[in-house]
Image (cartoon, helix red, strand yellow):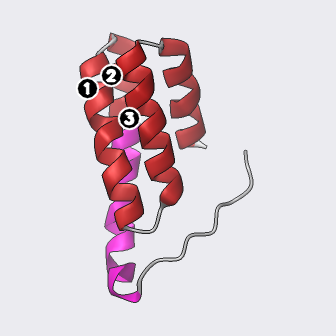
Amino acid sequence: MSEPITVVVAKDLEDLIPTFMKNRTKELETLRGALASGDLEQLRQIGHRMKGVGNSYGFEKVSTLGMQVEDGAKAGNRDALAAVIAEYAD
């Protein structure tokens, strides 16, 4: 496991973070399923959504990984996608 990442969340978003994190867990399972089935379009769409939602809530790393998922899906690079999804799980 990697080192914990510190995130600064805007005061008005604090109450939303438990739901945000629960949604990221569901998202991870969807990413794994899409990778297993080779659904690059679903991976691209999820990656794109991750890019937007991460920064909105102060989770820059989610946005960064989302960009990598989107780019990996566009390139059809399953190995890179598997590595990014594993990093996301961590």
Q: Are marks 2 and 1 in contact (CB under 8 Å)?
A: yes
At 38% across and 31% down in the image, what residue appears? 70
Please tell me which residue lies in front, 20 or 73.
Answer: 73
Q: What is the spatial separation of the Cα atoms under label 1 and label 3, in whole angstroms?
A: 12 Å
- Circle nearer the N terminus (1, 3): 3
At 46% across and 77% down in the image, what residue appears? 9
Q: What is the spatial separation of the Cα atoms under label 2 and label 1, in whole angstroms?
A: 6 Å
Percent across and percent down for residue 41 are 25, 21
Where, quadrant-wise, is the C terminus in this rendering? Answer: top right
Q: Identify the amino acid type marked 2.
A: Ala
Name the element at disc 1: helix
Q: Is residue 55 left or right of residue 4?
A: left
Give the number of the mark in front: 2 or 3: 2
At 35% across and 23% down in the image, what residue appears? 33
Question: Circle 1 sits on which residue?
Answer: 42
Q: Identify the amino acid type marked 1.
A: Gln
Q: What is the spatial separation of the Cα atoms under label 2 and label 3, in whole angstroms?
A: 9 Å
At 31% across and 18% down in the image, what residue appears? 40
Quadrant of the image occupied by residue 15: bottom left
Q: Which mark is residue 63?
A: none
Residue 64 on the magenta span? no
Please tell me which residue lies in front, 11 or 21.
Answer: 11
Kindly tell me whether residue 22 is visible in this rendering: no
Please tell me which residue lies in front, 83 or 19.
Answer: 83
Kindly tell me whether residue 60 is visible in this rendering: yes
Question: Circle 3 sits on which residue?
Answer: 29
Mark 1: few, some, or many residues within 10 Å (few <14, many ≥20)?
some
Which residues are the magenta region?
A: 11-28
Give the number of the mark in front: 2 or 1: 1
